[in-house]
Amino acid sequence: MNYNDTPRHQGLRKRLVDGLKIKGIRNEKVLEAIGKVPRHLFMESGFINFAYKDQAFPIGAGQTISQPFTVAFQTQLLNIQKNEKVLEVGTGSGYQAAVLVEMGAKVFTIERQRELYLKVQKFLPSIGYSPACFFGDGYKGLPNLAPFDKILVTAGAPSIPQELKLQLKIGGTMVIPVGDKNRQEMYEIVRVAENDFTSKKHGGFVFVPLLKGTVNN
Ligand code: SAH
């Protein structure tokens, strides 16, 4: 790929991955993907020096690129296998989508802010990642493209949207942070049968809120 990824960037990425291991991320495929995706290219230029710290950062339009640990944690819970169909709600910077593509998933990602959608749809293919990008309200999912093996929500939801649950394959998993605006609990939902879902909780996180409707500018 023709982009600026220096030995220094690569070294910082390796340190980030080592840090994620220490924090408990064990899935080799997740660590490998984070070791490959050039996170510095997803950030506003002023913040580039922070790209490989384990922190969330502003990406414009009042939104953030998730903290690498959070990306790794959610991706590990999803247990992604090659060629799985994955729906991501909340494209944001496109970083999480790139990690999923890097792992060999067929990625469908949806963003409610037109400005972010347009930016990512152009940017990701320019660095070699081509998920299917959609502009719309992720509360509704993508009913025409369902069912999905995995669904990943990367914004804090007040409750688990029924429409998304119904877009899971039987045996499929959804990872979604659920709670109020100050704190959400990470849920792992498995559709074990047509009308039977199990749920497990995996600790507290803080995401920007999952909001209804779209923003068209
Ligand atoms: N996955 C992103 C994290 C983005 S932050 C990354 O890797 O950078 C959450 C994103 O979810 C924001 O861009 C926000 O605009 C978006 N969002 C919030 N509610 C949404 C909804 N109902 N549908 C789609 N996107 C939504």
Image: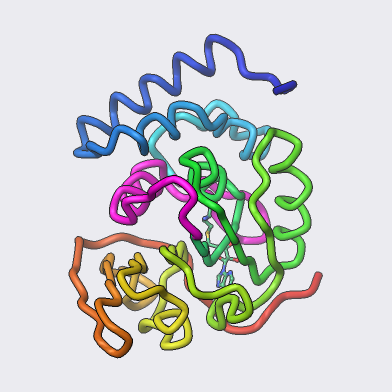
Find residue 92 and report its horizontal and vertical position in percent: 60, 56
Determine whether, in the image, residue 118 is placed left or right of residue 182.
Answer: right
Vertical relation: 194 (above or below) 33: below
Which quarter shows the N terminus? Answer: top right
The colour scheme used to paint the residues is rainbow
Q: Look at the image and say whether residue 95 sits in the magenta stretch.
A: no
Displayed quadrant of residue 138: bottom right
Q: Look at the image and say whether residue 77 sits in the magenta stretch.
A: yes
Find residue 64 and report its horizontal and vertical position in percent: 54, 53
Residue drawn 35% across the image and 27% down it: 17
Query: Where does ligand 1 appear, by image quarter?
Result: bottom right
Vertical relation: 37 (above or below) 213: above
Vertical relation: 73 (above or below) 217: above
Farthest top residue in view? 7
Find residue 111 and report its horizontal and vertical position in percent: 63, 66
Residue drawn 75% across the image and 67% down it: 114
Total numbered labels placed on residues in the image: 0
Determine whether, in the image, residue 162 is placed left or right of residue 125.
Answer: left
Residue drawn 25% across the image and 81% down it: 197
Residue drawn 36% across the image and 38% down it: 30
Nearer to the camera, 9 or 149: 149
Which quarter shows the C terminus? Answer: bottom right
Displayed quadrant of residue 151: bottom left
Residue range in magenta is 56-85
Find residue 203 and report its horizontal and vertical position in percent: 20, 61
Nearer to the camera, 183 or 2: 2
